[in-house]
Image: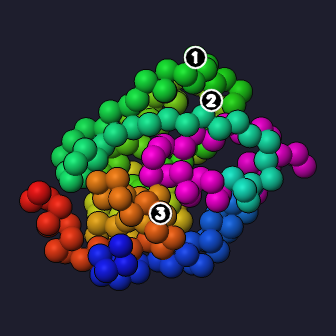
Amino acid sequence: MQQDIERILIDRHTIANRVRELAEQITADFHEKDELPEITIVPILTGSFMFVADLIRDLPLRMQIRLISVSSYPGTSTTAQKAKVGSDLDDLPASLAGSHVLLVDDILDSGQTIKLVSEILSAKNPESLKTCVLLRKQREAAMQQPVDYVAFDIPDEFVVGYGLDYDDYYRNLPDIVVLKPDVVSESQEG
């Protein structure tokens, strides 16, 4: 796998430090009258699993975790497909009234996924709904989508590692990396 990497975009130490900072910011924002409320964390799988695992370890909040799946990256196409919500979203309570919800995603690219899931969650009437992404690409659609917490703004490049994949590979890389162009083009051909 190492031979497939063109360069490291964000190393594991920078990621760990920024995740801790985000956790502190989220904790401060959810702090109410000297108390920390219970929150419902809704990670979008599969790409956010490493990010959310590290994030929740640094959140001193009582929480429920409701995993959901949304597919918007079939094969090698990234933004041409519309986001499709998995049936696990039906497992969420019919109402989230009184709940503080934190929606977590790995990457904000087209903005379709986080917009769709935010609309679905908002319809369940939570007390509050905040959004958090590990990465936001510097492209018009992503920059126009409102997000409460962004760990990193990155160039408009295809990245993998730290949970993000390319055809289900490279998720286990501890850094966020850019693959060599020939690796991506070979996989698209075959």
Residue assigned mark 2:
126
Instruction: Give the residue displayed 67% in from the left and 68% down from the top.
Output: 21
How packed is label 1: few (under 14 Cα within 10 Å), some, or many (20 or more)? few
Tell me the mark number nearer the camera, choosing from 1 and 2: 1
Name the quarter where the C terminus is drawn: bottom left
Residue assigned mark 1:
94
Apparent side of residue 72 relative to residue 45 in the rendered image (left or right): left
Q: Is residue 88 magenta?
A: no
Residue with the most extreme left position = 189
Camera sees residue 26? no
Q: Position of residue 19 (x, y in %)?
A: 62, 66
Amino acid identity at mark 2: Pro
Q: Secondary structure at mark 1?
A: loop
Camera sees residue 175? yes
Q: Secondary structure at mark 3?
A: loop
- Magenta segment, which residues? 28-55
Amino acid identity at mark 1: Ala
Q: Which mark is residue 172?
A: 3
Using the numbered discs, state the Cα–Cα distance from disc 3 to disc 2 in whole angstroms: 34 Å
- Choose the circle earlier in sequence order: 3 or 1: 1
Instruction: Give the residue displayed 20% in from the left and 67% down from the top.
Output: 184
The tally of labels here is: 3
- Choose the circle earlier in sequence order: 3 or 2: 2
Tell me the mark number nearer the camera, choosing from 3 and 1: 3
Instruction: Give the residue displayed 35% in from the left and 59% down from the top.
Output: 169
Instruction: Give the residue displayed 24% in from the left and 77% down from the top.
Output: 180
Quarter location, residue 15: bottom right
* Residue 61 vertical position relative to residue 180 in the rendered view, above or below: above
Q: Secondary structure at mark 2?
A: loop
Q: Is residue 32 magenta?
A: yes
Q: Position of residue 162 (x, y in %)?
A: 49, 64
